[in-house]
Image (tube, helix red, strand yellow):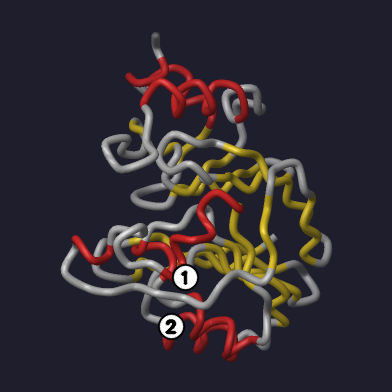
Amino acid sequence: MKVEYFVVGPIDVNCYVISDDNGIGAVIDPGGNAERILAYIKKENLDIRYVLNTHGHGDHIGADDAVRDGTGAPLYIHAADADMLTDARKNLSAFMGYQALARPADVLLHGGEEITVGDIKLKVVCTPGHSAGGVCFVGDGFVFSGDALFADSIGRTDFPGGSQVELVSSIKRELMVLPDETEVYPGHGPKTTIGWEKVYNPYLQW
């Protein structure tokens, strides 16, 4: 699997473009700067099959429609966050000084699905606590953790629908059971590993 990432939008979200050896790919959390994302896709001649949101906050959805329109790929989001796409107050962008909106999702996730991106298999696991519909995409040796798990930290839980107890519980249940060498690609900041977070993440020590 090839992973390319872009730091996009007003709050520096990590948008990931993944692809297999045949150029079949997906875009995860296109939060902004669609022109950069689409330019890379065109340069690499990628066949983008999915646009995937880890959750519905405005900083992660800002370029959903532009990337959908530029690739023809459907948008997937968890059902519990679906209404955030069309409501700037619910996705919090209205409170951050801008408006991020997208058309309704093409497919609603509920957890447990397997998304096939060419030779890449992604399992959808539910990690609520940052938002009600937060999910991570788990593959063989890697996980795209959105705003659930960061390097040495976790996502904010003081937003509507947030709960630190629920987030920590879901991280331990779904992510800390993965092999230590699993690479974690978070929604903000540098990548990390499950093994490192087991030992050094202060939020996971209780």
Per the model, the C-alpha gap separating discs 2 and 1 is: 7 Å
Residue at the location (66% across, 27% down)? Answer: 179
Q: Is residue 148 above or below residue 10?
A: above
Q: Residue 128: x and y, percent?
A: 50, 36
Secondary structure state at the residue bearing disc 2: helix
Q: Residue 65: x and y, percent?
A: 51, 81
Amino acid type for the residue under numbered disc 2: Ala
Q: Residue 112: x and y, percent?
A: 75, 41
Decide which of 154, 16 is in the foreground and name it: 154
Q: Is residue 4 left or right of residue 161?
A: right
For the C terminus, which image quadrant?
Answer: top left
Residue at the location (23% across, 66% down)? Answer: 94
Disc 2 target residue: 34
Q: Is residue 20 left or right of residue 143?
A: right
Q: Residue 79: x and y, percent?
A: 61, 53
Decide which of 195, 117 is in the foreground and name it: 117
Near mark 1 (Cα within 10 A), the count class, few <14, some 14-19 or many ≥20, is many
Picture quadrant where residue 181 is located: top right
Disc 1 target residue: 30
Picture quadrant where residue 177 is located: top right
Q: Number of callouts in the render?
A: 2
Q: Residue furthest left?
A: 97
- The answer to whether the residues at label 2 and label 1 have Cβ atoms under 8 Å apart is yes
Decide which of 169, 23 is in the foreground and name it: 169
Q: Is residue 21 left or right of residue 165?
A: right
Secondary structure state at the residue bearing disc 1: loop
Q: Is residue 141 left or right of residue 170?
A: right
Amino acid type for the residue under numbered disc 1: Pro
Q: Residue furthest top?
A: 206
For the N terminus, which image quadrant?
Answer: bottom right
Near mark 2 (Cα within 10 A), the count class, few <14, some 14-19 or many ≥20, is many
Residue at the location (46% across, 76% down)? Answer: 102
